[in-house]
Amino acid sequence: MDRLPLELVTNILSRLDFEEQFPHLPTVNSIWYAALKDIKLLVVKASPSLKQADLGKVVALFPLLQELHLKTADYMQDTALVHQIAQQFKGHSNLRLIVSSSDMIIKGVLKGCPKLESVILTAEPIMQSHNEDQVYETQLNQEMNLGSVTTNLESTSTSNFRSYDSTPLGPRGRRNIGLLLAALPKLKNLDVDGPSFWRRHCLFGQSSDAVHAPRRIGHHLESLKLTSVNSWTMINFLSWLDSYNRNITDNSRVAISDVDKEFKVHDASEFKINIPQPINDQAPLFNLRHLYLDIDYLYLPANAIKVLSQGSPNLQSLKIKFGILPHNLIFDIKTYMSSLKSLTLSKCDVWFVSQNWAHFCIFLASRKISTNVNTTSQGLETLSFNMCTIQILEEPRWHEEYQQLMSHTHHHPDSYTRTPQPHIPSFGLKQLKIFDTGHSRVDSSVLHTLIVTFPELTVLRLDVTCDCFPIQDAFFLESLRRGFANLRTLELRAGKPQHLPDTSDSLVDSAIIDQSIRMPYLKRLSLWCFTSFPHFLLRPNVDTIEELVINYPAIIPAFQDTHPVQHGHSSTQGSEKYSQLSRLKTLEIRGLSNAAHAICLAVLDMIASNAPNLTSLSLIALCRVTASLPLRHLLHLTTSSPNLTTLHTSGFIFPDDGFICLCNVWPNLSSLEIIGAHCAGTLTPEWEKQSLDPFMASHRKLYRLTLGISQLAIPGFELLNASALISQLTSRGNLMMSDFDFDSDFMHTVQAANMATYKRLGAYMRAKYFWMRECIIHGP
């Protein structure tokens, strides 16, 4: 390494885990010392050795450091150790990004990180707190003073390492987004789990009047992600935006009593604030582009969207997860968030005048007519719904508001028929995802409306009904060809059929109908649970697909030509295989039934018979029993896909000679996972010496190894047998079988001891094959 360029040595050393020997690397030679000086990314795990080395002194060794990640060590039980190490951080003059699970690191952040642009505080280690409610009440009654922040931090630095204390930066006080925005003016990205936001009765620790609120707080912030938000934090955050907007508008004073009256409601969805239009360039979060809210199944206030739109007028991406949404949410998004380009709702119930997903998406994505001829509303580009259901709004006033809003757009759902309307302006929607919608899956009519309405779609991911593709309908297939023409990603998850389809006439019809759907730009294709194998989607696009996912086909696929045949000739159906998939790089096959193994192998044999550029293969059979992976399939893969780097099997028993056969193939293999009970056989010293050692010696790029074994017979790694222990205790008279409870702590202790043994074996193998980064051993 001494002969390598300095930049390359720096790249190599930056990829190492920070372990006990890492602080001593600068003492190796001058080249390593200089290379470490140039490291810009440092990932450290909380350990006693790191605490002894002192995180502050370690960070000071890297003058050009830009990113610091502090993580909890694997299997570490002392959660307070993370807080103790985080408190050692004293700041860094060049640091741009900090990721930490402990908020004690905020002390150093506020004192010595003038160039910091991103702060990510993940969920903190779980700690016991018997008086948590009392501590929160104490914090609510305290004064927050920015001038005494440093003093308060100093006082907490020697008193308590826990996050649940009663200091001004006490229970989640160090996760106070108001404090961070005020103290770090250059902050662009803020991600906090379990945040707080000041107190209800004062703004930023100053006077209760909004007129005295500090200016330009968070003005440079571009991305804000808040997870596990509690109710008072959300209300305080919206109250701050509201007060700031009022101050901008008329410089009026807002009395505390008036603010209290606004928030004393029984249902948070009734929370209303009348806000005049603010001056956009003075909005508190003027540059905010991305907002993520995980509100933990709380009621979102009724006009929260209006407040957010005025406080962050340039918001482009909004994601709401785990929320109870008000009835007017969709209408407010349509009305106020004109600059929004991406909307994601996850695990929420949305309210609309129709349960038709096509009408719902058209309403959100339609472009608003602008009175200024020089400016046009671009509309949404991304819509994503995961585990959402549409609740119907039956009150007439909602239907009137819907008609009124649609009258000011270029589009109306009723204007779309089975015949495309070329005079209607095109939508700008490019990505659409509708997953896990319960019983309201996308059927053929909704799919037809979506693809006709959104011709510019490049990503389409839908939960569809099992009969969503009437492949005997030539007009419908022609519409699909036009609508799918620009797709780069297509993912279709079909539902379970209520009855088996009647295929008696399908072969006759398929002989005269061209079923193929050509997508010239398609890169990723994912197909789930189709009752008949979707050759009409796969075969025409074999020359463009780079990633293919086939999940849970109902039957063993039979090859069928999707193109029409001449009269007097039969359709090609049998054991044929696909021609060369020249661009295929990733292939995932999953089966779910008693025939899962046969289905997976049949699909593998049909698709991967000639995939020279395949680099990743996942073969997963979800079944209670395991089956053998024939050696011929493995040998065929080595010749058809010589560049494989990732192999993942589950539910398949690996051949006895599998490791020996793979010794001289796939030299770039980086990850090998053989998961499932008894899938990797018995680990013995003989097998380790004859099979595993030669395989590992020829694959020095393998960094991840996972094995599911049936038995462990390596000296020094003996497993406890609960039945044998019980028999011994019973024969000695120490235990009566009639009194023994197999669900007692004794059984859990035995299981925990065996799991610890598997972990020790993984650590032993990782140390033996030192180039590996991770080794996991699973028992039966």
Image (tube, rainbow, N blue to C red):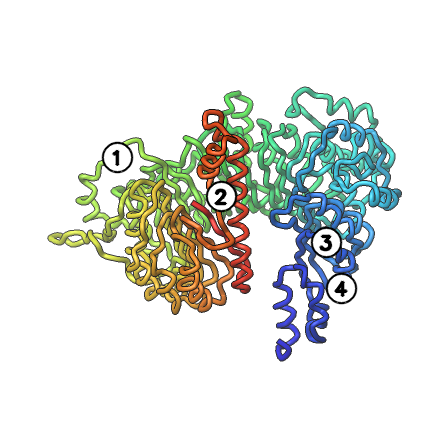
Q: Report, in whole angstroms, how far the alpha carbon at label 1 lies from the one at label 4.
A: 68 Å
Q: Residue 324 carries which label?
A: none
Q: Residue 500 carries which label?
A: 1
Does the rendering let one see residue 593? Answer: yes
Residue 765 left/right relative to 99: left
> Which residue position is annotated with label 2?
720
Q: What element carries label 2?
A: loop
Q: Report, in whole angstroms, how far the alpha carbon at label 4 lies from the one at label 3.
A: 21 Å
Does the rendering let one see residue 485? Answer: no
> Disc 3 residue type?
Glu
- What residue is at 59 percent from the left and 32 percent from the top? 323
Q: Which of 554 and 717 is in front in this view?
A: 717
Query: Quick one: label 2 or label 1, which is nearer the N terminus?
Result: 1
Q: Report, in whole angstroms, how far the alpha carbon at label 1 lies from the one at label 3.
A: 57 Å
Residue 649 left/right relative to 314: left
> Disc 1 residue type?
Leu
- The image position of residue 438, as x and y in percent, is 44, 32
> Disc 4 residue type?
Leu
> Which residue position is annotated with label 4?
61
Q: Nearer the viewer, residue 290 or 584?
A: 584
Residue 468, relative to residue 767: is it above or below?
above
Q: Residues within 10 Å of mark 1 (few under 14, many from 20)?
A: few
Query: Quick one: label 1 or label 4, which is nearer the N terminus?
Result: 4
- What residue is at 67 percent from the left and 54 percent from the top? 69
Q: Residue 117 carries which label?
A: 3
> Disc 2 residue type?
Leu
Residue 590, relative to residue 746: is it above or below?
below
Q: What element carries label 3?
A: loop
